[in-house]
Image (spheres, grey):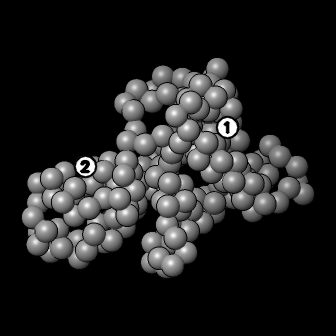
């Protein structure tokens, strides 16, 4: 799954050919279709794996910090940190997929939006916990805060696609607080 994820993340769904997948996975087209049903089925599985990885990183940040709000802040800061292993693309795979998927591709559009909604719901739950713990105002709206933070993260991750943005993204995400993992 990792090689397919790297390929799709790097090239995008529409720019990844079956020949690219055959070479990366060392599989024949019939085997790919037997295992995943279609190129779209394989892509869906890679997006699910990416979302799971993203959630694990968020959960890790939440566990390392003394409060959920501090964990969320650490997670956002980590988005601007230079990873030890360079990702296949500078932008988040979900952001990149959403930007590259036309509205007339309802299956991939719906899948990507559902995944982004699930992340937004997770963020809203973090803000609820923070509100209940008194970390943010009692009248704060967790859903609105989550939507706003996701929009800011989306912008940061889209901005990261610029070839000249590496240091800027790190600064915007508060690189000075990057920690080794």
Residue drawn at 18 percent across, 73 percent down: 33
- The quarter in which the C terminus is drawn is top left
Mark 1, Cα crowd under 10 Å, few <14 / some 14-19 / many 20+, is some
In the image, is 130 to the left or to the right of 83?
Answer: right
Q: Is residue 53 left or right of residue 119?
A: left
Residue 3 got which mark?
2
Q: Nearer the viewer, mark 2 or mark 1?
A: 2
* Dot 2 or dot 1, earlier in sequence: 2
How many numbered circles does the render carry? 2
Q: Where residue 4 sits in the image (x, y, percent)? A: 27, 54
Q: Secondary structure at mark 2?
A: helix
Rendered image quadrant of residue 128: bottom right
**How far separated are the C-alphas under marks 2 and 1?**
30 Å
Q: For residue 13, which quarter of the picture?
A: bottom left
- 108 relative to 18 in the view: left or right: right
> Closest to the observer: 24 or 82?
24
According to the picture, the residue beneath numbered tag 1 turns out to be 73
- Secondary structure beneath disc 1? helix
Q: Residue at x 61, y 42 (%)?
A: 159
């Amino acid at each position: 799954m990792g090689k397919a994820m790297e390929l799709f993340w790097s090239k995008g769904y529409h720019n990844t050919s079956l020949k690219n997948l055959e070479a990366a996975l060392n599989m024949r087209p019939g085997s790919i279709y037997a295992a995943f049903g279609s190129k779209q089925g394989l892509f869906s599985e890679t997006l699910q794996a990416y979302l799971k990885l993203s959630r694990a990183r968020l959960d890790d940040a939440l566990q390392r910090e003394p409060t959920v709000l501090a964990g969320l802040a650490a997670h956002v800061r980590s988005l601007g940190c230079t990873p030890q292993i360079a990702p296949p693309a500078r932008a988040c795979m979900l952001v990149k997929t959403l930007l590259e998927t036309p509205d007339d591709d309802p299956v991939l559009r719906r899948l990507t939006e559902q995944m982004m909604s699930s992340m937004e719901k997770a963020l809203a739950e973090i803000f609820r916990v923070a509100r209940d713990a008194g970390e943010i105002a009692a009248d704060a709206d967790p859903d609105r805060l989550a939507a706003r933070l996701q929009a800011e993260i989306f912008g940061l991750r889209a901005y990261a696609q610029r070839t000249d943005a590496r240091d800027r993204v790190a600064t915007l995400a508060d690189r000075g607080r990057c920690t080794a993992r």
